């Protein structure tokens, strides 16, 4: 497979991110204006300096027109795209290739979602006209399948696993409490997490990420131009994407303890970036913790923990903010919230802050390489994105 | 000459105890929220069509058709994967039409065709009334064919058609009404006796020759005149299953016949009589094929497989009689006609595909093999009767359902193939990985005025 990567050829030179939460007083266009304005200011550019846009949203609007009309763009190209919950990262990935190609000099990737206008609990998707036979499992239900499978395969009793999952939620809420832009900013005690009634399987309310509104944006240029905008750019070392054949939904060999799509995309990303030992070389990561067992399994799929050991690493605090390999330092989907189109860019926003020493109470000491991981779909049938970023070339 | 060559029956898993309705003793059979007369008809017919040979006609009788106008029999034919050239007939308007359908099947068989006759009903009544507590939900199916294949031959019959305001319901009314029973008994009683007498005469036998007598009708008093008039002994009378099941509308006479056949011996003569808006009576003689052509599920097997802790208000919600607070989830959208037609083998027939190159099974059917990548090298395979089991599962408390929680399972099929599928007729506490399952045809929901049928899995009954 030819996936050659564009390591160190593209830099992020400005970012913006709205607070995530229930923004009854802001529509999608308001959020886009807020995030874009913050990004322009961050890169110290006038809007007109941006040559092209990539707009990610799952269901809050259609067409690039959604952005160009809100921002009153001067007839610039705007691509609207979607890749389920990996939409925000997908916007960035495509913007990066465009600027690397030389077709444009300065581009913006921006994602937005307004989930709180529908009045429904949980995620709802709109589908094209169908034959009525599609699986009707909700998102929590599909991801809840990971937990008993993991417990069974690695001989972890379910009570212990429940504690491990609760600790993941606890960790992410603790991090979110240090984050003024997060949806949920209070620490949540373990016993409250464990006492929550079931939403699906072993998962209670606190095992599920927040439904929220928000927007985030990044401005990118070729690495050699980064100095025009900032003294502290961050460089893209890897961008990878894997869309699976939904093998898990057809093959009896799939056992719900892994995401082959994540393995494929992280393997490709490590190759592009020259990472040979992710556990040692990746300083910090923002991963797709839509549900607590997802984060657990991702640690192994991405090589941060050996197979069957992530639960111990979680329990020992390896992935805590103060741990050896902090995961979701900004609170993750869990406490920052998950406005679908924006999440991938929000993850990059934390890497941006951390790599520039601007993460305040969440600051990790001397991070070298950061990783963002963004997933869309369900275990057995999903898409996965991985990026690797750093604050120096080479 | 013609006869019944195969048969099948079906009783739903749930029972509502009459005490829960404040209506006395015993219990009534209750179709689940995901069942209707069509889905139950399919379940009864699956046993009947097994080994029955090529069918030329389908006759469906019900007084609770899911569609008032759209051929419900076509859905039954599709779910059974019957030949596309089958002739269909759909009867309704009186519970006597179940037996009427059997007579139509007998006529088709006498004309040289094999006919599948199915009768099913979901019986409701105004809450607190006798129709509600006395009714039951169920289905029965018969295949009629030549003498040479019959396990019971038709040897006599008689009919009467009577204009009478006994049971009636306008199409726009949810609940049927019935005139006072004494009036019905007075008018219909003598008609039942007369029809029974003529049926026996046409068979050339007397009452004492009858091994089993099935008596069914809208008016118990009317029908009670028959044993008196014919001087039948109590042991000749088939248990009408009113205490344990309730009267299952158009299916009932046939259901009692099926139960009689479950216990019959070669040489037995059976009288089946149904009295409603007149009377139909048919006399059958059981042959020695009865021992080898019985269905996989006897009526008593369905009877014994049940859950009877249903709450009355749940029952009322299931039947749409009681409005209730909906969840904060979108209303289901109607399935669309072109995708349903393209996928009709899969959706109704549960026909998936198997790769001819590497033998991997696919549910739903695919053009590209998930294992070897071969394109357009698949053959069709019906998975409806394939053994299957729970690979893993979860209890979904967020998904909308009339029987929370949704039990969502990943189901693995013997010989390969996997499907993400809802389980039904199951106690969530008893689900475990490895549980053996069987597929069942259900109505998932009705969205924007369109019924959405598909398959679910249930623990083996």
Image: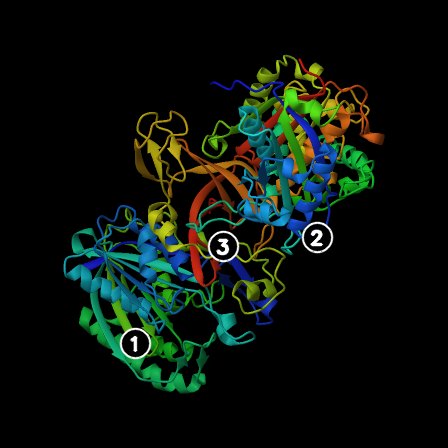
Q: Which residue is mark 3?
A: B13
Q: Residue shown at 81%/35% (left/top)?
A: A174
Q: Which residue is mark 1?
A: B279
Residue at 55% of width from left, 47% of height from top? A65
- Residue A234 appears in the figure: no
User: Residue at point 56% right, 54% down?
Assistant: B401
Dot 3: element: loop
Front residue (pair B314, A343): A343
For the residues labelled 1 and 2, the Cα–Cα distance comes to: 70 Å
A143 is higher (above) or lower (below) than B356: below
- Check if mark 3's residue and mark 2's residue have beta carbons within 8 Å: no
Front residue (pair B233, A326): A326
Q: Is residue B415 above or below residue A30?
A: above
**Mark closest to the chain's N terminus, 3 or 1:** 3
Task: Return the x and y of residue B430 as percentages of the image width and height.
Answer: 58, 43
For disc 2, the chain is A
Residue B177: % across, % down:
45, 80
Give the alpha-carbon distance from disc 3 to disc 2, as whole Å.
50 Å
Q: Residues within 10 Å of mark 3 (few under 14, many from 20)?
A: many
Q: Which residue is mark 2?
A: A26
Q: CA distance from mark 3 to mark 1?
A: 31 Å
Q: Say which quadrant the C terminus of chain A sits in.
A: top right
Q: Are marks 1 and 2 on the same chain?
A: no
Badges 3 and 2, same chain:
no
Q: B252 or B404, which is in the foreground?
A: B404
Q: Residue furthest right?
A: A361
> For numbered disc 1, what is the local secondary structure?
strand
Q: Is residue B338 visible?
A: yes
């Amino acid at each position: 497979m030819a996936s050659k990567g564009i390591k160190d050829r593209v830099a992020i030179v400005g970012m913006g991110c709205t607070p995530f939460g229930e923004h009854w007083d802001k529509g999608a266009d308001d959020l886009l204006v807020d995030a874009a304005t913050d990004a322009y200011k961050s890169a110290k550019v006038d809007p007109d300096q941006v040559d092209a846009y990539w707009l990610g949203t799952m269901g809050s609007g259609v067409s690039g027109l959604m952005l160009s009309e809100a921002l009153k763009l001067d007839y610039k190209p705007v691509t609207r795209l979607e890749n389920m919950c990996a939409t925000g990262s997908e916007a960035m990935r495509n913007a990066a290739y465009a600027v690397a190609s030389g077709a444009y000099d300065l581009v913006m990737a921006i994602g937005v979602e307004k989930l709180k206008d529908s009045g429904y609990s949980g995620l709802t998707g709109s589908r094209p006209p169908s034959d009525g036979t599609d699986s009707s499992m909700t998102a929590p239900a599909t991801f809840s399948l990971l937990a008993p499978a993991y417990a069974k395969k690695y001989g972890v009793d379910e009570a212990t696993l429940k504690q491990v999952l609760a600790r993941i939620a606890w960790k992410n809420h603790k991090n979110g409490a240090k984050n003024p832009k997060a949806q949920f900013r209070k620490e949540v005690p373990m016993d409250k997490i464990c006492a929550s009634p079931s939403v699906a399987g072993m998962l209670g309310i606190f095992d599920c990420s927040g439904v929220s509104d928000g927007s985030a944006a990044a401005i990118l240029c070729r690495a050699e131009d980064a100095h025009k905008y900032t003294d502290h750019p961050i460089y893209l070392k890897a961008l990878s994407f894997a869309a699976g054949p939904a093998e898990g939904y057809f093959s009896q060999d799939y056992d719900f303890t892994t995401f082959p799509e994540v393995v494929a995309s992280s393997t490709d990303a490590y190759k592009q970036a020259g990472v040979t030992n992710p556990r040692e070389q990746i300083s910090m990561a923002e991963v797709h913790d839509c549900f607590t067992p997802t984060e657990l399994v991702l640690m192994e799929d991405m090589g941060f923990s050996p197979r069957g050991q992530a639960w111990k690493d979680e329990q020992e605090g390896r992935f805590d903010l103060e741990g050896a390999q902090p995961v979701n330092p900004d609170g993750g989907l869990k406490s920052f919230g998950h406005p679908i189109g924006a999440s991938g860019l929000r993850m990059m926003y934390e890497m941006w802050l951390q790599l520039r020493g601007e993460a305040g109470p969440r600051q990790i000491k001397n991070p070298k390489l950061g990783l963002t991981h963004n997933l869309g779909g369900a275990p057995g049938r999903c898409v996965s994105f991985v990026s690797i970023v750093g604050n120096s070339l080479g | 000459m013609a006869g019944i060559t195969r048969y099948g029956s079906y009783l739903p898993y749930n029972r509502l105890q009459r005490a829960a309705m404040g209506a006395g003793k015993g219990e009534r059979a209750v179709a689940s929220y995901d069942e209707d007369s069509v889905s139950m008809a399919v379940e009864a017919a699956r046993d009947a069509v097994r080994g029955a040979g090529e069918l030329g006609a389908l006759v469906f009788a019900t007084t609770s058709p899911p569609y008032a106008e759209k051929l419900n029999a076509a859905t039954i034919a599709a779910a059974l994967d019957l030949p596309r050239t089958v002739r269909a007939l759909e009867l309704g308007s009186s519970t006597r039409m179940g037996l009427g359908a059997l007579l139509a099947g007998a006529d088709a068989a006498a004309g040289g065709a094999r006919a599948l006759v199915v009768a099913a009903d979901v019986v409701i009544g105004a809450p607190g009334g006798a129709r509600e507590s006395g009714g039951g939900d169920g289905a029965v199916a018969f295949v009629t064919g030549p003498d040479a294949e019959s396990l019971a031959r038709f040897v006599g019959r008689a009919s009467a058609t009577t204009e009478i305001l006994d049971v009636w319901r306008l199409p726009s009314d949810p609940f049927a009404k019935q005139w006072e029973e004494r009036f019905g008994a007075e008018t219909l009683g003598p008609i039942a006796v007369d029809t029974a007498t003529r049926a026996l005469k046409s068979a050339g036998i007397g009452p004492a020759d009858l091994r089993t007598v099935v008596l069914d009708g809208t008016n118990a008093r009317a029908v009670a005149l028959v044993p008196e008039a014919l001087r039948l002994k109590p042991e000749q009378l088939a248990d009408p299953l009113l205490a344990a099941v309730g009267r299952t509308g158009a299916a009932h006479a046939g259901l009692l016949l099926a139960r009689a056949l479950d216990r019959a011996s070669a040489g037995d003569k059976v009288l089946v009589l149904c009295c409603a808006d007149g009377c139909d009576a048919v006399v059958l003689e059981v042959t020695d094929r009865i021992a080898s052509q019985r269905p996989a599920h006897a009526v008593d097997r369905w009877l014994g497989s049940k859950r009877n802790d249903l709450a009355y208000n749940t029952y009322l919600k299931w039947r749409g009689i009681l409005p209730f607070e909906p969840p904060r989830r979108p209303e289901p959208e109607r399935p669309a006609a072109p995708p349903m037609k393209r996928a009709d083998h899969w959706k109704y027939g549960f026909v998936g595909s198997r790769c001819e190159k590497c033998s991997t099974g696919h549910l739903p059917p695919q053009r590209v093999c998930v294992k070897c990548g071969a394109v357009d090298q698949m053959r069709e395979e019906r998975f409806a009767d394939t053994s299957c089991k729970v690979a893993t599962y979860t209890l979904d408390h967020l998904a909308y359902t009339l029987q929370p929680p949704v039990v969502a399972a990943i189901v693995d099929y013997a010989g390969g193939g996997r499907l993400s599928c809802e389980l039904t007729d199951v106690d969530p506490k008893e689900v475990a990985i490895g549980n053996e399952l069987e597929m069942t045809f259900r109505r998932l929901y009705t969205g924007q005025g369109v019924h959405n049928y598909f398959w679910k899995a249930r623990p083996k009954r």
